[in-house]
Image (tube, rainbow, N blue to C red):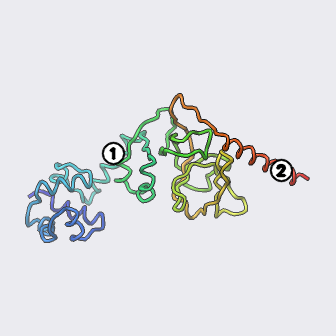
């Protein structure tokens, strides 16, 4: 007998699924899955192919490797090896994947599905790239890709620097961050385009922060400003100047 039955049981428990839940995902009866796990029957190849696609494993790995090896999970070892060989790869989160990222940002399998690229000029670190849309950060054009370095602690965020901020309420945004010295519970996000007003986010709502290191945009593109945008920009600048004069007086 192969180790496939033991591996099915290990993978099911790894995800926290009941036999009924796993059986539904595999398109088989629960009793048949139980027979596989108890090694009373050998799993069919078509079932193993579904499992392989689900967990990104080959048939050889499912049939011959002990995934639940007590000396160290084979999956953990494989992922560690993959991280070593792909340490310079940067995962890119396109706009169409932004909603899914909020749920899967910590799921290795979701992240593995993202396309990757490399930038040899970056210093060692943990990087991720995000596609942005809209004109709130002009002159950075819509459609640009922001490459950010992971910030592990909000205390490391520096005021007036640009970051990708991932939060539960606002999603993924590219903004200039202003820290409130009076309150550490909020971050103020500011657009470079002054037509957009600053707003606050609660620190508790922030999931991830990535310090912008590079901006990648298409060549030979020129951002055009329309009359309304220019009028709004001038109006905002006048208001800011007026406010400063009042404070000085």
Q: Is mark 1 on a helix, strand or loop?
A: helix
- Of badges 2 and 1, nearer the viewer stands 2
Q: How many labels does the image show?
A: 2
Q: Which residue lies furthest to the top in this view?
A: 220
Rendering quarter of residue 181: bottom right
Q: Relative to residue 128, is residue 15 depicted above or below?
A: below
Q: Nearer the viewer, residue 238 or 98?
A: 238
Q: Report x, y in % for residue 154.
A: 59, 56
Identified at 19% across, 66% down, the residue is 23
Left or right of 42 on screen, residue 18: right
Label 2 vs label 1: CA separation? 59 Å
Residue named by callout 2:
242
Identified at 44% across, 46% down, the residue is 94
Disc with the residue nearer the chain's start (2 vs 1): 1
Identified at 36% across, 40% down, the residue is 85
Mark 2 Cα-neighbour bin, 10 Å: few <14, some 14–19, many ≥20: few
Mark 1 Cα-neighbour bin, 10 Å: few <14, some 14–19, many ≥20: few
Q: Relative to residue 102, is residue 125 depicted above or below?
A: above
Residue 127 in view of the camera:
no
Residue named by callout 1:
81
Q: Report x, y in % for residue 6.
A: 18, 62
Q: Nearer the viewer, residue 51 or 169?
A: 169
Left or right of 13 on screen, residue 118: right
Left or right of 1 on screen, residue 151: right
Q: Report x, y in % for residue 244.
A: 83, 50
């Amino acid at each position: 007998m192969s180790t496939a039955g033991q591996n099915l049981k290990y993978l099911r428990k790894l995800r926290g699924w009941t036999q009924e839940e796993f059986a539904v995902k595999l398109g088989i009866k629960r009793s048949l899955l139980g027979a596989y796990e108890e090694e009373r029957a050998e799993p069919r190849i078509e079932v193993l192919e579904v499992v392989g696609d689900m967990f990104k494993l080959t048939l050889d790995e499912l049939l011959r490797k002990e995934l639940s090896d007590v000396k160290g999970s084979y999956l953990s070892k494989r992922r560690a090896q993959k991280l070593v060989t792909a340490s310079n790869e940067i995962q890119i989160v396109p706009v169409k994947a932004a909603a899914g990222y909020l749920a899967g940002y910590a799921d290795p399998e979701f992240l593995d599905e993202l396309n990757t690229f490399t930038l040899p000029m970056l210093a060692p670190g943990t990087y991720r790239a995000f596609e942005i849309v809209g004109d709130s950060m002009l002159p950075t054009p819509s459609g640009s890709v922001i490459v950010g370095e992971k910030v592990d602690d909000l205390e490391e965020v520096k005021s007036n620097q640009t970051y990708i901020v991932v939060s539960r309420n606002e999603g993924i945004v590219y903004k200039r961050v202003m820290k409130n010295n009076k309150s550490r519970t909020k971050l103020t996000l500011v657009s470079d385009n002054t037509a957009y007003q600053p707003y606050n986010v609660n620190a508790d709502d922030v999931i991830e922060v990535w310090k912008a290191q590079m901006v990648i945009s298409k060549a030979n593109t020129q951002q055009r400003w329309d009359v309304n945008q220019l009028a709004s920009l001038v109006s905002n600048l006048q208001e800011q100047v007026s406010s400063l004069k009042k404070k000085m007086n």
